Image (cartoon, rainbow, N blue to C red):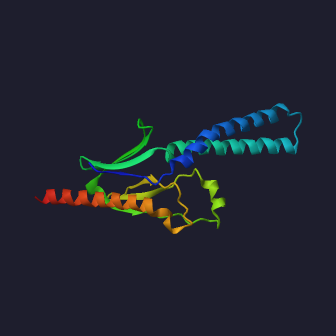
Amino acid sequence: MKKVKNDSQPFISYIVPIFILPFVGFFVGLYFYAILSSFDKINFGSIYGILLSVIFFYVIVRGLKNGILYFIPREECYIEDDNLIYRRIFLCKFIFKELRIRILDIENIIDKGCKIPKVSTRSLVLATFFKPYERILIKTKSGKEYKIFVDADPYTFRNDDDNKFIRTYNELKEMVIEEQSKLSFNKKI
């Protein structure tokens, strides 16, 4: 059984922030508590401090959730019993997402490509660091669409950024086409 794994994920660059973000969230929460406890009367500074710390805390929690659900888990596809099976597995035990798609129902596998950045420098794209982008789209004959394989760096500023992901996409497409031809040949016989 051949497996296609998404090896384009730079796990270290996501694990480090996930370990640091809870501490940052704790200190932001502590700051939020300090502002609330010193709240004598309503003034602009205290409302601004509360609002800013609540927004920052929300961004931290959202980043943690997306990092754990999308970027750290291992992603793999394989074929079993005439089905393409996609799994997003966390710590070798927890399956966050599993798809079973009949091989003969697959009409096309599309690489959605890189996102075009709205800003011109890489440093301004860091705001989307924990925003998932499932890059491969599987279209079935019934019209359903399935999105798989999270691209860790959807914004490319260099030409060579995409090679690992494109290699994974090509392996997946070749595996599906090969299995479809085997199944259709066996049907004819």
Residue 97 point in image, percent of width and height: 42, 43
Residue 18 point in image, percent of width and height: 59, 42
Q: Report the residue at 45% width, 37% height from top.
A: 91
Q: Report the residue at 89% width, 33% height from top.
A: 40
Using the rendered view, name the quadrant where residue 22 is placed. Answer: top right
Q: Looking at this view, is 137 or 91 the one in front?
A: 91
Q: How many marks?
A: 0
Residue 81 point in image, percent of width and height: 24, 46
158 in relation to 148, above or below: below
87 in relation to 116, above or below: above
Using the rendered view, name the quadrant where residue 143 is placed. Answer: bottom left
Task: Tell me: 41 left or right of 19.
Answer: right
Q: Residue furthest left?
A: 189
Q: Report the residue at 80% width, 33% height from top.
A: 34
Task: Tell me: 38 left or right of 172.
Answer: right
Task: Tell me: 109 left or right of 154.
Answer: left
Q: Residue furthest top?
A: 37
Camera sees residue 158: yes
19 in relation to 178, above or below: above
Camera sees residue 112: no
Residue 79 point in image, percent of width and height: 28, 49
Q: Report the residue at 49% width, 55% height from top.
A: 151
Using the rendered view, name the quadrant where residue 170 is placed. Answer: bottom left
Q: Looking at this view, is 21 or 44 the one in front?
A: 21
The image quadrant where one finds the C terminus is bottom left
